[in-house]
Image (cartoon, rainbow, N blue to C red):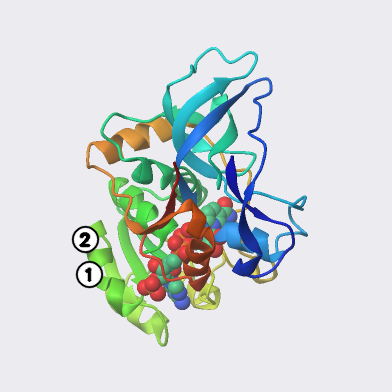
Amino acid sequence: MKAIVFDAFGGTEVLHEAEIAIPQPGPGQVRVRVQAVGVNPVDGKIRSGVMEAIFPTTLPAVPGGELAGVVDAVGEGVDDLKVGDEVLGWSDTGSYAQYALAPAAVLAPKPVGLEWTNAAALPVASDGAERVLDLLDVTSGEALLIHGASGALGTIAVQLAVARGARVIGTAGPANQEYLTSLGATALVYGDDLVHRVRELAPEGVDAVFDAAGKGALEDSIILRGTTDRIVTTADFRARELGIIFAEGPQRRSAARLAELAQEVADGKLVTTLSATYPLAEAAKAQQASDAGHSRGKIVLTVN
Ligand SMILES: NC(=O)c1ccc[n+]([C@@H]2O[C@H](COP(=O)([O-])OP(=O)(O)OC[C@H]3O[C@@H](n4cnc5c(N)ncnc54)[C@H](OP(=O)(O)O)[C@@H]3O)[C@@H](O)[C@H]2O)c1
């Protein structure tokens, strides 16, 4: 089968297409014929080698942690999925490939009518967004500030927070202000004088801060909160030294919750914006775009 492989850590030039063996599902696993793959910033971080201290990667490696596709073979002990089922969820063996293995327990049925690309955009972003909103304990009537609200995580986080009844102030660049408004946030341009500009929008203060950007807004967040409490980042590795919670894994990977959210996307109640789609063979271009850090919503690879 065709897969995208890297044999050394480095820039996107280390990614190349290769012919590798089709993987065989072990106990509790299924093999998925991949239709679409969500590209995540962490894919580029793993490729670059900066994640080695946290989770080491054995080379050569196939990138990718999420997918949507069709079950193609079933391992021992899997009773609730069968060949032909259309699914979305997480992959443990790398999803930038024509076939990938996934634990059956972390796959949700793909609702009829949900595009493969939109399905593949959901697992990591929804899991991460909801995990942080829970860590922050965001409830109705509260004011939540989200840094990086127009990215993949932010797009879902804004909508889930609004659904909880929170008032969301979201930051993004000038080109994404209208987009944030369309998601239900009060939009704000990131950058200078942020504390003052947030205070103008929320004179009574913000109750919680979700930093999905990791671009140096933690100090301003502490000033706005008056404390390090109820500030969580998914992206700023300075968190610990500043006394802030870094939302590291494990991901929850709840198939049941993913199924509910996938249905909401299919019903048009939740939006997974696609920033761009690329064919599998152009994975390096997709990661270049992801590394640049200015995607509106999600970057997705299409396969088969
Ligand atoms: N710890 C975990 O469990 C976990 C889970 C998922 C993701 N993550 C991490 O969380 C981060 C966000 O992931 P993602 O998939 O949402 O990334 P993404 O889609 O690449 O985020 C891109 C967005 O960031 C915005 N942005 C760029 N510079 C900014 C700044 N200075 N201030 C505010 N926003 C800025 C961009 O807005 P403009 O285009 O308008 O500039 C763009 O919309 C990544 O670092 C990822 O690795 C962690």
Name the kind of residue labelled 1 in the image. Glu
Is 13 placed left or right of 115 in the picture?
right
Near-viewer residue (262 or 187) = 262
Name the kind of residue labelled 2 in the image. Ser
Q: In the rendered image of this protein, does residue 196 appear above or below residue 65?
A: below
Q: In the rendered image of this protein, does residue 66 appear above or below residue 8?
A: above
Identify which residue is drawn at 34% across, 48% down. 160
Q: In the rendered image of this protein, does residue 199 appear above or below residue 113?
A: below
Is label 1 within 8 A of ligand 1 (CB to nearest ligand atom)?
A: no
Q: Are marks 2 and 1 in contact (CB under 8 Å)?
A: yes
Q: For mark 2, does the 10 Å Cα neighbourhood hold few (<14), some (14 to 19), or many (20 or more) residues?
A: few
Q: Which quadrant of the rendered structure holds the C terminus?
A: top left
Where residue 260 sits, quadrant-wise, is top left
Q: Secondary structure at mark 1?
A: helix
Residue 74 visible in image? yes
Is 210 placed left or right of 99 in the picture?
left
Q: Position of residue 286 (x, y in %)?
A: 48, 62
**Which residue bears the numbered disc 1?**
178
Identify which residue is drawn at 32% across, 61% down. 168
Q: Position of residue 27 (x, y in %)?
A: 68, 20
Q: For mark 1, does the 10 Å Cα neighbourhood hold few (<14), some (14 to 19), or many (20 or more) residues?
A: some
Residue 231 visible in image? no
**Which residue bears the numbered disc 2?**
182
Near-viewer residue (38 or 246) = 38
**CA separation, marks 2 and 1?**
6 Å
